[in-house]
Image: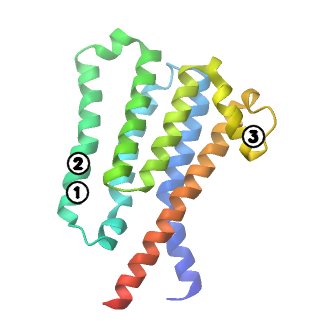
Amino acid sequence: MSKSAKQGSLLVALLPSVILYVGAIVLLALTRESLGGTVHYWEIFVAVVAVISLLSGWGQTYAANRSYLMYLIKQFIHWGLLIGVLWMFQTQGISSALGDQKYTLVLLYLLSMSAIVAGLYIDFKALFFGAFMAICTYLLAAPANVSILEPIGKTLRIADPQTKPLTMIIVMGVIAFVAGALVLISVRGSIMAKRSRA
């Protein structure tokens, strides 16, 4: 395979993560302006995350010699449960009882925790996305507690990070994306090594 073909296939492999992080950052920016006004977009985004998660773990499954069928079953159960819980919230009046603002935060925390759990036992890249979403959701839920940004800003040499929450969200998104990309590159290396041995 030529060098340009390898680079092209790496870019194609990174595209789902790019969509995931760009979509999350855009929605987080909109949610900062109107916490309850973006709830329907987040509901759609949960389905997008589920599809991307389903597609992005195939390589890791192959590299680890795991069953594709078990991978699919785990993914469908995992994301199906989250979507089922959100559907129950809608149909049983829980979302309207909470109100759009609180329901948006509940949805984001559920998405964060689901991504973290998926990262722990299905696809490690999802762990970084889940951690990113958890920190961002905390910032949305408790905007007065932006002091959490101080150590991150100090580490990254960003002055007054508390006054720049959107900038910090973008920076944290880029860091999480890079960490996930490194895992992807590692998995692709394992796949190429496995194919060369075969």
Q: Earlier in the sequence, mark 2 or mark 3?
A: 2
Name the secondary structure under disc 2. helix
Q: Is residue 173 left or right of residue 96?
A: right
> What is the CA distance from the residue labelled 3 to the residue labelled 1?
41 Å
Name the secondary structure under disc 3. helix
Q: Earlier in the sequence, mark 3 or mark 1?
A: 1
Q: Is residue 171 left or right of residue 45?
A: right
Of badges 2 and 3, nearer the viewer stands 3
Identity of the amino acid at label 2? Phe
Q: Residue at x 40, y 56 (%)?
A: 124
Q: Is residue 54 left or right of residue 6?
A: left
**Residue occupied by mark 1:** 72
Q: Quadrant of residue 61?
A: bottom left
Mark yes or no: residue 176 visible.
yes
Q: How is the image coloured?
A: rainbow
**Residue occupied by mark 2:** 76
The image quadrant where one finds the C terminus is: bottom left
Q: Is residue 117 left or right of residue 162?
A: left
Viewer-proximal residue among 13 and 175: 175
**Residue occupied by mark 3:** 154
Task: Check if mark 2's residue and mark 1's residue have beta carbons within 8 Å.
Answer: yes
